[in-house]
Amino acid sequence: MEPAFRKILSAAEEGSSAGKRLAARLIPRFVKDYPRLTVDAATSLVNLCNIRAHDNMPEPILAGIRKDAFKGLGLLCTSCADNPNKGSAVLSDIVDFLVSRLRWRPDRTREESHRTPCENGSSQMSPPPDIQDVLEALEDAFLTVPQQVLEHCWQALKASDRQSLAGVRHLVCCRLLKEREWSDLPGQGNIDSAETSKDSERPRSLAAFVLGSRPRVVAWIRKTALAFREGTTNCSWFAALGHCHVVQ
């Protein structure tokens, strides 16, 4: 019932710490049943992502709320993709917000500015907790709307913002291109058992897992990276996304 869902939205704005955290978890779960409230749902989650000092809430509690809210935004992308009316605009705003939060301080990225993260298995500075939350949300969004995520990442690269560059590089190189065991890939339980048995011994990246069945997205990556190749040093690792094996 819509009144019950509106109470969840109200809890995100006015509830206790427990109420806010519960709202962050319930909003993406039930918003698909109330598509006309998609904008309100996204706004509530963004506000929770931005929650900071609070008189009655210590920082660890606030960090937990933000973590659930970022996770909720990533999951909300699925509902937005299924909403032909307001969903597309809200989806773009969500991804833009998440990519804008992929920012490290310059002193934390000095080492990464000279080499690709995770290259040759080298150790890298772990992102701070808030950046980890954003990375996980973008991974969830990438599962549903990979091209939208990559388009916003590409815009961040073109802006030549050093802080954004570090975050986007980490997302692409250490999250999307990093090989994982089959069991660590999302949704593998829905794959045919014969295919699972065949592929389970072969590590696979999230990019290959998602883009392998999306030839149009792979073609866009290749075209975009090629068009921007001249005059940039940021293209090679982004272009690597376009080398994913495509299942025709």
Image: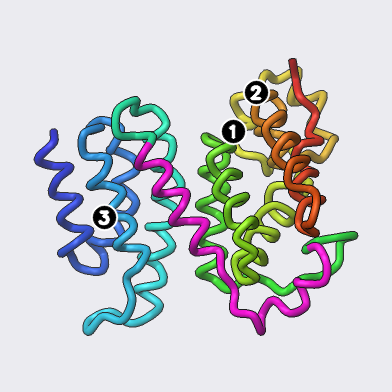
Per the image, label 2 sits on a secondary structure element best described as loop
Q: Nearer the viewer, residue 94 or 78?
A: 94
Q: Is residue 125 magenta?
A: no
In the image, what residue type sits under mark 3? Ser
Q: Position of residue 106 (x, y in %)?
A: 64, 80
Q: Which quarter of the figure has residue 214?
A: top right
Judging by the rendered image, the residue that carries numbered circle 1 is 187
In percent of the image, x 28 and y 38: which residue is there? Answer: 31
**Contact, CB < 8 Å: mark 2 with mark 1?**
yes
Residue positioned 55% across, 44% down in the render: 149
Q: Amino acid at mark 2?
A: Ile
Residue located at (46% from left, 47% from top): 74
Q: Secondary structure at mark 3?
A: helix
Q: How is the image coloured?
A: rainbow
Tell me which numbered mark, 1 or 3, is placed earlier along the sequence. 3
Q: Residue furthest right?
A: 120
> What segment is highlighted magenta in the picture?
89-116
Q: Which residue is mark 2?
A: 191
User: Is 181 or 170 nearer to us in this picture?
Assistant: 170
Q: Is residue 126 above or below residue 188?
A: below
Eyeballing the image, is 23 above or below 15? above
Q: Residue 105 colored magenta?
A: yes
* Category of crowding for the residue at label 1, using alpha-carbon neighbours closer than 10 angstroms: few (below 14), some (14–19), many (at least 20): few
Quadrant of the image for the N terminus?
top left
Q: Which residue is mark 3?
A: 44
Asked if disc 1 and disc 3 are in contact, CB closer than 8 Å, the reply is no
